[in-house]
Image: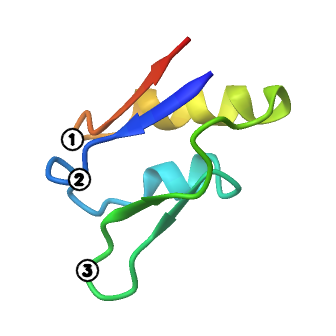
Amino acid sequence: MKVVIEEDKCCAAGQCVAAAPDVFDQRDDDGIVVLLTVHPPDDLAEGVRDAVAMCPAVAIRVEQ
């Protein structure tokens, strides 16, 4: 699994951080998503998929 984010689309909602806090964080100054790991381990895959589904800006996608 490879996680790809598009920072320019991010609206700083923070739902990705709530779904997968080991994979996503937010910048302190503006709340824009920060990707902590491009290739998360399998045990975090469900949280990543939840984050993709919940992102209101469609700023996150997963590639296999």
In the image, farthest residue toward the bottom: 29
Residue that badge 1 annotates: 57
Give the Cα distance between marks 3 and 2. 10 Å
Residue type at mark 3?
Asp
- Using the rendered view, name the quadrant where residue 58 is placed: top left
In the image, 38: left or right of 60? right
How packed mark 1 is, by other alpha carbons closer than 10 Å (few <14, some 14-19, many 20 or more), is some
Residue that badge 3 annotates: 30
User: 63 and 22: which one is in front?
Assistant: 63
- Marks 1 and 2 close (CB-CB < 8 Å): yes
Residue 57's spot in the image, x, y percent? Answer: 21, 41
User: 12 and 2: which one is in front?
Assistant: 2
Residue at the image point whose x is 71% and y is 55% from the top:
22
Residue type at mark 2?
Cys
Residue 43's spot in the image, x, y percent? Answer: 85, 31
How packed mark 2 is, by other alpha carbons closer than 10 Å (few <14, some 14-19, many 20 or more), is some
Q: Secondary structure at mark 2?
A: loop
Residue that badge 2 annotates: 10
How packed mark 3 is, by other alpha carbons closer than 10 Å (few <14, some 14-19, many 20 or more), is few
Q: How many marks?
A: 3
Give the Cα distance between marks 1 and 2. 6 Å
Image quadrant for the N terminus? top right
In the image, farthest residue toward the top: 64
- Using the rendered view, name the quadrant where residue 4 is placed: top left
Residue at the image point whose x is 70% and y is 27% from the top:
45
Whichever of callouts 1 and 2 sits on the residue coming sooner in the sequence is: 2
User: 32 and 14: which one is in front?
Assistant: 32
Give the Cα distance between marks 3 and 1. 15 Å
